[in-house]
Image: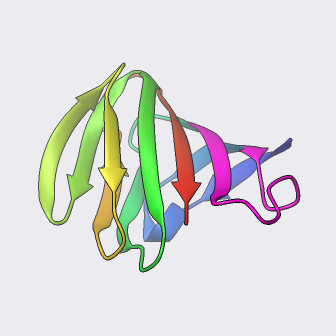
Amino acid sequence: MRHEPLPECHAGKGVLDWTEVLGPDQLKGRRLKFMHYNIMPPGTSIGEHSHHDDEEYYFVISGQGTMILDGKRFEVKSGDITAIYPGGSHGLENNTNDDLRFLVICVS
């Protein structure tokens, strides 16, 4: 597993603690493109961006934050899952005092 800091993800704020659980090397020829485990400290965000051909699913493990989906803001918390479909846009903010932990699953 690759584990490293990911600064200013998609032009967001702060540094994500990023771990690639499954990546392209393990998933050649599969529809599943990757699975990442992330820890987003307080005040950190992932900038709003679009996906053209991929779908992403965010599963919140612990904490809470604000997910931006196609320009609309939604509060998310432990146990929530969000879906981003091809052509959709999204971003995520941790505007709390606790870490936000989540999985990102991407399929094509």
Please give the name of the residue rendered at 44% of the width and 61% of the height, measured from the top-left corner.
Answer: 55
Q: Quadrant of the N terminus?
A: top right
Range shown magenta: 21-38
**Residue 17, percent from left and from top:** 65, 41
35 and 17: which is toward the camera: 35
Front-most of 37 and 7? 37
Is 103 left or right of 73, judged from the image as shown? Answer: right
**Exactly how many numbered labels are in the figure?**
0
Is residue 19 shown left or right of residue 70? right
Q: Which residue extends farthest left?
A: 72
Task: Give the quarter of the figure containing the C terminus.
Answer: bottom right
Location of residue 103 in the rendering, given as x and y in whole percent from the top left corner: 54, 37
Would residue 76 be found to the left or right of residue 57 on screen? left
Tell me: residue 10, above or below residue 21. Answer: below
Residue sitting at 31 percent across and 61 percent down? Answer: 90
Q: Indicate the colouring scheme.
A: rainbow
Q: In the rendering, at what x and y percent does residue 99 appear?
A: 47, 26
Q: Position of residue 101 (x, y in %)?
A: 50, 29
| 49 inside magenta stretch | no
Closest to the observer, 70 or 6: 70
Write down the quadrant of residue 77 in the picture: top left
Which residue shows up at 83% across the image and 63% down it? 28
At horizontal 29% and vertical 35% (from top left) the residue drawn is 65
Asked if 11 appears above or below 73 in the picture, the reply is below
